[in-house]
Amino acid sequence: MPISRRTVGKTLVEGGHDVRALDSEIELEGLFDPEVLELAAAEGRVLVTANIKDFEPLLREWAGESRSHAGAILVPSSVRNEAFGVLISGVENTLADTTQEEWADRVEWLRRA
């Protein structure tokens, strides 16, 4: 299940979140994972990804190099395979009661409702 603009992103935008989804912008198609993390960091966006296999080591690499990012939410496969509502509420719960500044260099697993 890809995390897409059409399903998850649209609902998060309607809930007041500033979302940029890779699948909704042609110029972003085909970006490699390091480029995605660099883009999110440059734009100050918390990265939400189900691609734990690739992004968890990348985030550790950045931490080891003292490279800063805007935060990341890792979506476990147990949530990916459920309804989009679980994913949406999980993102909202994970972000709840925090500011953008508090997410700097923070990595968390998605919190379920």
Image (tube, helix red, strand yellow):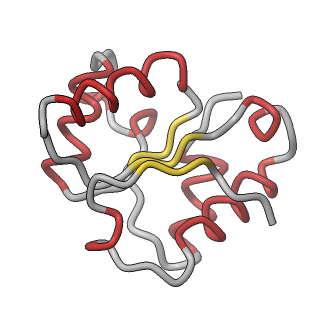
Along the viewing direction, whichever of 23 and 101 lies nearer the viewer: 101
Residue at x 26% of width, y 73% of height: 101
Residue occupying the far bottom of the picture: 97
Q: Quadrant of residue 34?
A: top left
Q: Residue at x 51, y 68 (%)?
A: 13
29 left or right, relative to 17 = left
| Residue sitting farthest toward the right | 82
> Looking at the image, is 65 positioned above or below residue 41?
above
Residue for point 73% across, 65% down: 89
Across the whole image, how many numbered discs are drawn on residues? 0
Residue at (37% x, 54% y) in the render: 106
Q: Is 18 on the left-hand or right-hand side of 67?
A: right
Measuring from the top left, give residue 73's x and y in whole percent: 51, 48
**Residue sitting at the far front:** 64
Q: Is residue 20 above or below residue 23?
A: below
The image quadrant that residue 11 belongs to is: bottom right
